[in-house]
Image (cartoon, helix red, strand yellow):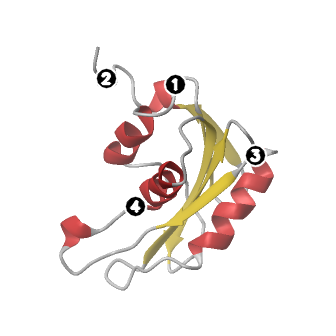
Amino acid sequence: MRKEELIGNAMAVMKNAYAPYSEFTVGAALLTKKGKVYTGCNIENSSYSVTNCAERTALFCAVKNGERQFSAIAVVGGKKGRVENYCSPCGVCRQALREFCDKDFKIYLYNGVEIKTYTLGELLPESFELG
């Protein structure tokens, strides 16, 4: 799957985000090594620590369905659904992805005009892992 298609999936699911407090909606599309896509959006809660990010929503959905190997994720986000800046995964999401993804796992970020590509190793150097 092309990164532009993955971005399109993230853009589409961003519309389902529940963000009444921040009004900052995020969509993520996670690509498995088998070519299947799992999407997620952010889901806020009035008790902020209960909030779940789009990236983890997609990851947890995939894992729930038996997936364990991933090749890329696209992340988009913006205030009131306007994608105008890059929206990078937070540290918690980076570490959650690291549980299942190698350091060369691709992360695509989109600002409404251009796509930036990073590896998980670039965004989370010296990541924690057991062993």
**Can residue 15 be seen here?**
yes
The location of residue 67, given as percent across then percent down, is 56, 44
Q: Which residue is mark 4?
A: 53
**Rounded to the nearest whole Å, what is the CA distance between mark 4 and mark 1?**
20 Å
Relative to 75, does residue 126 appear above or below in the rendering?
Answer: above
Asked if the residue at tag 4 contacts the one at tag 3, i.e. Cβ–Cβ closer than 8 Å, the answer is no
Quarter of the image where one finds residue 129: top left
Asked if the residue at tag 4 contacts the one at tag 2, i.e. Cβ–Cβ closer than 8 Å, the answer is no
Asked if the residue at tag 3 contacts the one at tag 2, i.e. Cβ–Cβ closer than 8 Å, the answer is no
Left or right? Give the position of 61 relative to 4.
left
Q: Nearer the viewer, residue 71 or 68?
A: 68
**Rounded to the nearest whole Å, what is the CA distance between mark 2 and mark 1?**
11 Å
The location of residue 105, given as percent across then percent down, is 58, 30
* Mark in the foreground, 1 or 3: 1
Q: Earlier in the sequence, mark 2 or mark 4?
A: 4
Q: Residues within 10 Å of mark 2 (few under 14, many from 20)?
A: few
Q: Earlier in the sequence, mark 1 or mark 3?
A: 3
Badge number at residue 3: 3
Q: Nearer the viewer, residue 20 or 105?
A: 105
Q: Residues within 10 Å of mark 3 (few under 14, many from 20)?
A: some
Badge number at residue 102: 1
Q: SS for tag 3?
A: helix
Image quarter hosting the N terminus: top right
Q: SS for tag 4?
A: loop
Q: Which residue is mark 2?
A: 129
**Rounded to the nearest whole Å, what is the CA distance between mark 2 and mark 4?**
21 Å
Asked if the residue at tag 3 contacts the one at tag 1, i.e. Cβ–Cβ closer than 8 Å, the answer is no
Asked if the residue at tag 1 contacts the one at tag 2, i.e. Cβ–Cβ closer than 8 Å, the answer is no
